[in-house]
């Protein structure tokens, strides 16, 4: 195999490519008008909506009931967006997309400061085209806001350790404190814990732990407290017991036990998520390890001493990635979105390999490993999308029009371009093309797959059903569902009359006839649960199809829609 040689790809070319990716991945989806997905996205959108309509910017509420499970920062961002842009899906999703863009930029800054400008721009591009960060940024979840704060705080701790001069170190400590304070307003102590184990493990591994580092950390925590405490104290004043619930029950017990929501998962829960969510760039981490090993062969250095640019930063990134993974895996509560903050170091480590290749500095063994990772996209890419369409059609019911098939084939064939350029050793063209190809695949998924999935997990049709009636029943029970977007899509005059638990979710196996139930209780189920619910509650025949839902309400309903009539407890037909 040829020796690695320096490529003439310019920083300007990389910045243009990164800007294009940022525009398409983090701003382009706004134009798709994708419905809100249930339960989480619709639920949190409804909380932000209620904050705007009530004018209470301290206590987040849902159907009038205080919501204690999440801090306030992301809700504030959504509420401000709704107030400025109106009550629509774009306003709900814009803050999440902007935080996703901020995470991309923060990842780029980390790479830039540790490995140089070229690695920084590449890191931003790689982060934006990894599976999990790209997909989750579209779904308006709170965790997206934590990523840029935690990434920048970790970087600035490392910068402060290397800085000279009291004023510079003090300024960095203040900035770190602000970032940690914002992370506390986003996810409580989670951000502080992730930054702490990342930087703390780095100090231990490099034997740089000192009194100065401890004082800096304490000062940053004090400043973080000044930023976050006012809201937490205001919440406790208005809602006595909030601090105990959130920090003891949700934080402490959620970490130490499996008694909280999302508990009971095995210790290895995050490993397949990291491997699949980091595709395709996580495949280059073995190349980074091989290059690091080759460079350090036969070298001896004092603790913390570096023989090539970014070496100390490499240790930081590995500590960041591994320590956070271990901490989150040890927690009793686990959820896909919780692992999000480990993806920036993955992107930066992979980008460092790419940058060394472009600079002609990658060791020969690592160069050979790089080729084994890069070259297969020429035959995997053309097959991936075309073969996935029939699978998605069968499993998810995804409609596959002819133009989607043609576009899938064209996007898939684009993967042949970087592979061909690589075979000709035209690295200046092959590597940027190799990043743009996954971006094209991501855009196809966002344009054709995500809207369908959102439609299948959305209650807009149900809300419009109640909007047409002009009134709400005394109680709406959503069976085997959590309440989410149905509240967001209700007319304002209907939302204003909502009472606590007027819309509520309940499991089918918990349903029992209730003598004291509201006389006009409405049951909402998906079609496969109609027979079970009717049998459990002794409901008379007469179900209405409303979008993907089936609705059963008292006979005095004023709306004429197709009705579902029972022939037996197990057989149902439409009339």
Image (cartoon, rainbow, N blue to C red):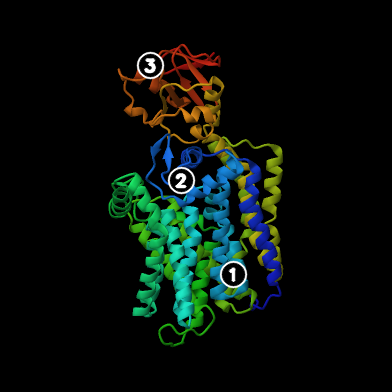
Structural crowding at the residue carrying mark 3, measured as other residues with C-alpha within 10 Å and reported as few (<14), some (14–19) or many (≥20)? few
Q: Is mark 2 on a helix, strand or loop?
A: loop
**Distance of label 2 from label 1 (alpha carbons):** 37 Å
- Which residue is more in the foreground, 352 or 297? 352
Q: What x and y, as percent, mark residue 1?
A: 63, 75
- Total count of labels: 3
From the image, which quarter does the C terminus lie in? top right
Q: What x and y, as percent, mark residue 105?
A: 58, 63
- Which residue is more in the foreground, 309 or 153? 153
The label number, if any, that marks residue 57 in the structure image: 2
Structural crowding at the residue carrying mark 2, measured as other residues with C-alpha within 10 Å and reported as few (<14), some (14–19) or many (≥20)? some
In the image, taking residue 360 as reference, residue 326 lies left or right, namely left
Q: Choose the circle earlier in sequence order: 2 or 1.
A: 2
Establish if 147 lies above or below 234. below
Contact between marks 2 and 3 (CB within 8 A): the answer is no
Give the residue displayed 69% in from the left and 48% down from the top. Answer: 409
Q: Choose the circle earlier in sequence order: 3 or 1.
A: 1
Give the residue displayed 37% in from the left and 28% down from the top. Answer: 508
Q: What x and y, as percent, mark residue 256?
A: 28, 55
Residue at image mark 1: 120
**Distance of label 2 from label 3 (alpha carbons):** 35 Å
Asked which quadrant contains residue 180, the reply is bottom left
Q: Choose the circle earlier in sequence order: 2 or 3.
A: 2
Q: What x and y, as percent, mark residue 525?
A: 45, 26
Asked which quadrant contains residue 560, the reply is top right
Residue at image mark 3: 519
Q: What element carries label 3?
A: loop
Q: Is mark 1 on a helix, strand or loop?
A: helix
């Amino acid at each position: 195999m040829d020796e690695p040689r320096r490529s003439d790809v310019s920083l300007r070319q990389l910045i243009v490519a990164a800007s294009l990716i940022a525009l398409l991945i983090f701003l382009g989806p706004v134009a798709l008008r994708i419905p809100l997905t249930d339960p989480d996205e619709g639920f949190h959108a409804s909380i932000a909506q209620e904050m705007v309509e009530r004018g209470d910017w301290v206590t987040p509420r849902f159907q009038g009931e205080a919501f204690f499970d999440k801090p306030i920062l992301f809700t504030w961002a959504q509420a401000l967006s709704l107030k400025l842009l109106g009550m629509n899906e774009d306003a709900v999703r814009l803050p999440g997309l902007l935080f996703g863009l901020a995470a991309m930029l923060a990842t780029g800054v980390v790479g830039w400061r540790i490995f140089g400008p070229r690695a920084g721009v590449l890191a931003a591009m790689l982060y934006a085209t990894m599976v999990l960060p790209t997909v989750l940024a579209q779904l308006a979840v709170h965790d997206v806001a934590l990523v840029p704060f935690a990434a920048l705080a970790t970087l600035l701790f490392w910068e402060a350790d290397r800085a000279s001069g009291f004023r510079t170190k003090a300024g960095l400590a203040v900035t770190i404190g602000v970032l940690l304070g914002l992370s506390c307003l986003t996810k409580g102590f989670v951000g502080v814990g992730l930054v702490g184990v990342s930087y703390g493990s780095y100090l231990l591994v490099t034997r740089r732990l000192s009194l100065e580092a401890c004082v800096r950390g304490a000062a940053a925590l004090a400043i973080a407290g000044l930023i976050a405490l006012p809201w937490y104290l205001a919440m406790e004043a208005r809602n006595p017991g909030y601090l105990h619930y959130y920090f003891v029950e949700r934080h402490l017990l959620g970490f130490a036990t499996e008694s909280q929501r999302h508990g009971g998962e095995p210790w290895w829960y995050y490993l397949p998520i990291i491997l699949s969510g980091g595709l395709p760039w996580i495949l280059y981490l073995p190349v980074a390890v091989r290059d690091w090993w080759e460079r350090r062969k036969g070298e001896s250095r004092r603790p913390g001493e570096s023989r090539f640019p970014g070496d100390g930063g490499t240790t930081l990134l590995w500590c960041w990635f591994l320590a956070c993974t271990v901490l989150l895996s040890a927690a009793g509560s686990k959820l896909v979105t919780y692992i999000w903050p480990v993806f920036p170091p993955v992107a930066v480590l992979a980008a460092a390999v790419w940058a060394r290749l472009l600079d002609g500095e990658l060791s020969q063994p690592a160069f050979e490993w790089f080729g084994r990772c890069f070259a297969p996209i020429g035959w995997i890419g053309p097959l991936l999308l075309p073969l996935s369409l029939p699978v998605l059609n069968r499993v998810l019911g995804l409609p596959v029009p002819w133009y989607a098939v043609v576009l899938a084939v064209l996007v898939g064939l684009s993967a042949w371009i970087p592979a061909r350029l690589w075979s000709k050793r035209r690295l200046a063209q092959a590597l940027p093309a190799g990043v743009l190809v996954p971006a094209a695949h991501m855009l196809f998924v966002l344009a054709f797959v995500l809207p369908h999935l959102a439609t299948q997990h959305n209650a807009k049709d149900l809300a419009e059903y109640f909007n047409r009636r002009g009134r709400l029943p005394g109680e709406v029970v959503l069976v085997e569902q959590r309440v989410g977007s149905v509240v967001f899509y209700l007319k304002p005059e209907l939302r204003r009359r909502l009472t606590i638990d007027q819309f509520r979710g309940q499991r089918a196996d918990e349903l029992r006839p209730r003598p004291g139930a509201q006389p006009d209780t409405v049951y909402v189920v998906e079609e496969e649960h109609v027979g079970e619910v009717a049998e459990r509650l002794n409901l008379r025949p007469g179900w209405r199809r409303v979008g993907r839902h089936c609705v059963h309400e008292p006979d005095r309903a004023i709306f004429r829609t197709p009705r579902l009539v029972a022939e037996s407890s197990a057989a149902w037909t439409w009339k």
